[in-house]
Image (cartoon, helix red, strand yellow):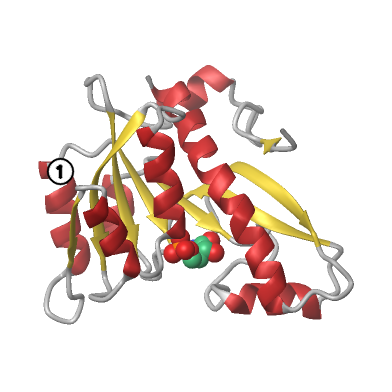
Amino acid sequence: MDLQLLINRTNVRGESSSSLSENFCKPNKCSVFRLGVLVSGSGTNLQAIMNACRNKRVPAKVIIVISNKKDALALQRAKKYNIKSGFIDPKKYNFDKKVIEILEKQKVDLVCLAGFLLKLSKKFIKKYRNRILNIHPALLPKFGGKRMYGINVHKAVLEAGEKNSGCTVHLVDERYDHGKIILQKKVKVLKNDTPETLQKRVLKQEHKIYPEAIKLFIKRCL
Ligand code: GRF
């Protein structure tokens, strides 16, 4: 598999992998690794994660799916798989506070952002430090940041005349698209690519690397 694996490398400060793994995550001492997935849209990455858990490619279970958008297709996908799911209206509630309450109640070990478009608060990130993953449709650190989401990313890649694009799974910290990179996959930019055709090919790879990255994360945590 042509996956660019970065998780096992010594980090920039030269810490050994064991000292790094000690503060990497703090899973609950339970047999199944419990995932909470935050979504805003179509949920194709959620689907890939649920499938991988179901057929035991990933030793985990999606326990809860939470959306900040009422009509997110992702919620229907969760429902179809009998997974607890719900919409929290950020206009009515303190979204992050509510989500923390739910994740705590559900004893979630790892939070996966899958097409989730809200920026999480510092408080949230502190609470789940090193236990939040995100997927981004480009080769970070390139083409990340505040306005870099959805089709904008692929437009920017084509405008910059890049030969390659791809996708990245990374840990989430306080800055947009900034935390430690777990896994990346390159996708060649083709001569006749439009933002839409590139997006489609990148998305296909996202569905492969997200479950793979979760598996790697679990291996280091258990
Ligand atoms: C994906 O490209 C993902 O990288 C980004 O949002 C897009 C939509 O994903 N964060 P999904 O179909 O909702 O999983």
Where on the picture, by quarter, is residue 160?
bottom right
Asked whether the viewer can see residue 180, the reply is no
- Please state the total of marks drawn on the protein image: 1
Q: x%, y% of residue 106?
A: 14, 41
**Among all residues in the image, which is located at the extreme front?**
80
Disc 1 residue type? Answer: Glu
Ligand 1 is within 8 Å of the C-beta of the residue at disc 1: no
Q: Residue at x 46, y 36 (%)?
A: 214
Where on the picture, by quarter, is residue 30?
top left
Quadrant for the N terminus in the image: top right
Badge 1, how many Cα within 10 Å: few under 14, some, many 20+?
Answer: few
Q: Secondary structure at mark 1?
A: helix
Name the residue tied to disc 1: 104
Up-down relation of residue 87 to residue 183 (above or below) = below
Give the left or right position of residue 102, taking residue 168 as reference.
left
Quadrant for the C terminus in the image: top left
Give the left or right position of residue 222, taking residue 32 as reference.
right
Up-down relation of residue 11 to residue 69 (above or below) = above
Q: x%, y% of residue 144?
A: 61, 66
Up-down relation of residue 145 to residue 8 (above or below) = below
Q: x%, y% of residue 41?
A: 38, 70
Q: Residue at x 17, y 37 (%)?
A: 107
Q: Residue at x 23, y 26 (%)?
A: 28
Q: x%, y% of residue 45?
A: 46, 54
Q: Residue at x 70, y 56 (%)?
A: 166
